[in-house]
Image (cartoon, rainbow, N blue to C red):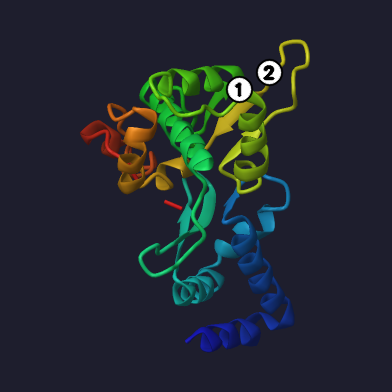
């Protein structure tokens, strides 16, 4: 099936079409998500906007155990693994906690109506780190310190398009943190349950689905992976 889709692309678009297909596939495999406005991602989103390319990539990723997602309103695309079929390397507890706090802060701001048309919220890093400290204040476990938090955000989450960080304001030792709606797809309920005993934030609930459907938030405040 994958070969027939690729043959269809080559017959219709020639070798250039095959190159575009491969570039989009490799970009998604390397970064997992592409978000409109990020440098070097426009060509991949343009390729995915064509139903022929999208179908071919969808088939390929399905064969590899991934689901291809494209959110037109929020202007991003990405691949999510079928964790029941794939034996993927496990995310560290530190990175999982940072992801969870990103999701919580995103939800809190969205519920306040602070998200833009693409469900992006903007907070300062210092505000985010203070919220993290609030959430883990009752935990007896060692906390992620400030330098480690900055490192995780810059090296683990920004390259994958989940967040975007502004340049450092040296006078205030602060920078803007843009949290994108992708996070609502990356925090499954089983991860929350696992973390409840670790950081004592069991009272915080997250939406199962993206804000692209506002009715979901109005109906419940539960969660939804990487």
Instruction: Determine whether, in the image, residue 185 is placed left or right of residue 32.
Output: left
Q: Is residue 127 above or below residue 222?
A: above
Instruction: Determine whether, in the image, residue 39 is placed left or right of residue 85.
Output: right
Residue at 60%, 22% (x, y): give it: 125
Q: Secondary structure at mark 2?
A: loop
Q: Quadrant of residue 105?
A: top left
Q: Is residue 154 above or below residue 86?
A: above
In front: 137, or 164? 137
Residue at label 1?
125
Residue at 44%, 71% (x, y): give it: 65
Percent position (x, y) of residue 97?
47, 36
Instruction: Determine whether, in the image, residue 100 is placed left or right of residue 151.
Output: left
In front: 76, or 82? 82
Percent position (x, y) of residue 168?
74, 23
Q: Are marks 2 and 1 in contact (CB under 8 Å)?
A: yes
Residue at 78%, 16% (x, y): give it: 170
In front: 5, or 111? 111
Percent position (x, y) of residue 78?
52, 56
Query: How far apart, in angstroms, are the residues tagged by discs 2 and 1?
Result: 6 Å
Determine the residue located farthest toward the top in the rendered image.
171
Q: Is residue 30 visible?
A: yes
Count of numbered badges drawn on the protein: 2
Percent position (x, y) of residue 107?
39, 30
- Which of the marked residues, 2 or 1, is nearer the chain's N terminus? 1
Q: Residues within 10 Å of mark 1 (few under 14, many from 20)?
A: many
Q: Quadrant of residue 32?
A: bottom right
Q: Secondary structure at mark 1?
A: helix
Determine the residue located farthest toward the left in the rendered image.
219
Q: Is residue 37 visible?
A: no
Residue at 34%, 45% (x, y): give it: 224
Q: Quadrant of residue 106?
A: top left
Residue at label 2?
174
């Amino acid at each position: 099936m994958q070969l027939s889709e690729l043959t269809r692309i080559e017959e219709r678009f020639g070798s250039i079409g095959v190159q575009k297909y491969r570039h989009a596939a490799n970009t998604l495999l390397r970064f997992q998500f592409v978000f409109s406005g990020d440098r070097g991602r426009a060509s991949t989103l343009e390729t995915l906007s064509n139903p022929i390319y999208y179908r071919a990539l969808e088939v390929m990723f399905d064969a590899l155990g991934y689901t291809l997602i494209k959110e037109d309103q929020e202007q991003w695309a990405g691949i999510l693994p079928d964790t029941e079929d794939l034996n993927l390397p496990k995310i560290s507890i530190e990175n999982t906690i940072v992801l969870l706090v990103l999701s919580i802060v995103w939800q809190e701001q969205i519920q306040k109506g602070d998200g833009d048309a693409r469900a992006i919220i903007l907070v300062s890093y210092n505000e985010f780190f203070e919220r993290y400290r609030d959430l883990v204040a009752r935990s007896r476990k060692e906390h992620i310190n400030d330098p480690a938090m900055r490192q995780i955000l810059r090296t683990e989450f920004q390259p994958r398009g989940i967040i975007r960080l502004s340049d450092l304001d040296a006078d205030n030792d602060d920078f803007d943190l843009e949290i994108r709606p992708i996070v609502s797809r990356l925090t499954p309920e089983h991860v929350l349950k696992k973390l409840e005993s670790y950081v004592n934030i069991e009272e915080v609930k997250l939406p199962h689905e993206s804000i692209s459907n506002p009715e979901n938030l109005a109906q419940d405040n539960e969660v939804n992976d990487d």
